Image: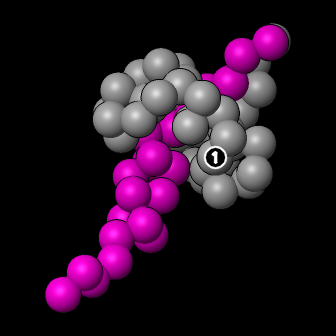
Amino acid sequence: MANPGEISEVKFLTIAEVAAMMRVSKMTVYRLVHSGDLAAVRVGRSFRVTEKDVNEYIERSFYDAG
């Protein structure tokens, strides 16, 4: 995670934005968050995910199909 001075530079995404970015349903993103596979911050009753965490999750998820 970023240092306290850099936190204002972190881009937080909503669950809907993450779902659109990954081309999956919102429920799939909620499952990833609740299982701990995708890091998220709880803000009130909703979650926010950093763009960096989404990109890292996608990179970890690649596999060689050939």
Where residue 60 appears, as percent x and y from the top left, is 44, 69
* Picture residue at 67% right of the left edge, 41% below the top: 31
Q: Which residues are magenta?
A: 45-66
Where residue 24 appears, as percent x and y from the top left, is 41, 35
Tell me if residue 56 is in the magenta stretch.
yes
Could one spot residue 45 in this view of the protein?
yes
> Where is mark 1, residue-wise?
32
* Picture residue at 60% right of the left edge, 29% below the top: 27
Q: Is residue 7 above or below residue 45?
A: below
Q: Is residue 1 left or right of residue 18?
A: right
Quadrant in the picture for residue 63: bottom left
Look at label 1 and name its amino acid. Leu
* Picture residue at 47% right of the left edge, 19% below the top: 16
Q: Is residue 54 above or below residue 14?
A: below
Task: Point out the residue furthest to the bottom here.
Answer: 66
Where residue 47 appears, as percent x and y from the top left, is 68, 24
